[in-house]
Image: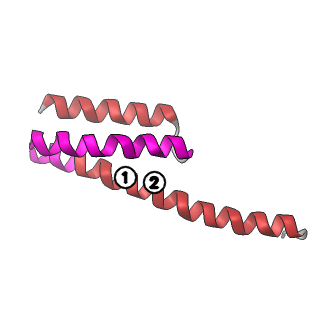
Amino acid sequence: MANTPQAKKRIRRNNRRAEINGARVSRIRGFVKKVEAACEAGDKAAAAEALKAAQPEMARGVARGVLHKNTVARKISRLSKRVAAL
């Protein structure tokens, strides 16, 4: 249990940041799911549009520090390959 005021503040701050970061990751997952759903449906135009919307969101996740750079690069690469294969 935290005893010092600084440690108590860090606990409050960490909880708040975890909430914000969780929302960011969840939002990114939603964008990725839209691309995957369009790929499953076989709609190349919708998939390309969804990918175009998802890429900056994923890059923003890297910039904010909620996702690792290589993870996002891998996911974008795989999604791009799926969209191109349609």
The reply, left or right, for residue 60 in relation to residue 43 is right
The colour style of the image is secondary structure
The amino acid pointed to by label 2 is: Val
In the picture of the structure, the residue carrying the numbered disc 1 is 29
Q: Where does residue 38 sit, x and y in percent of width and height?
A: 16, 47
Q: Is residue 75 above or below residue 41?
A: above
Does 46 appear in magenta?
yes
Give the SS element for disc 1.
helix
Q: Where does residue 69 sit, x and y in percent of width and height?
A: 50, 34
**Is label 2 in contact with label 1 (beta carbons under 8 Å)?**
yes
Q: Where does residue 54 sit, x and y in percent of width and height?
A: 32, 45
In the picture of the structure, the residue carrying the numbered disc 2 is 25
* Residue positioned 37% across, 42% down in the render: 56
- Could you say which is closer to the camera, residue 52 or residue 41? 52
Does 77 appear in magenta?
no
Q: Which mark is residue 12?
A: none
Q: How many marks?
A: 2
Q: Which residues are magenta?
A: 36-65
The reply, left or right, for residue 68 in relation to residue 38 is right
Give the SS element for disc 2.
helix
Cα–Cα span, label 2 and label 1: 6 Å
* Residue positioned 48% across, 31% down in the render: 70
| Quadrant the C terminus occupies | top left
The amino acid pointed to by label 1 is: Arg
* Residue positioned 10% across, 48% down in the render: 41
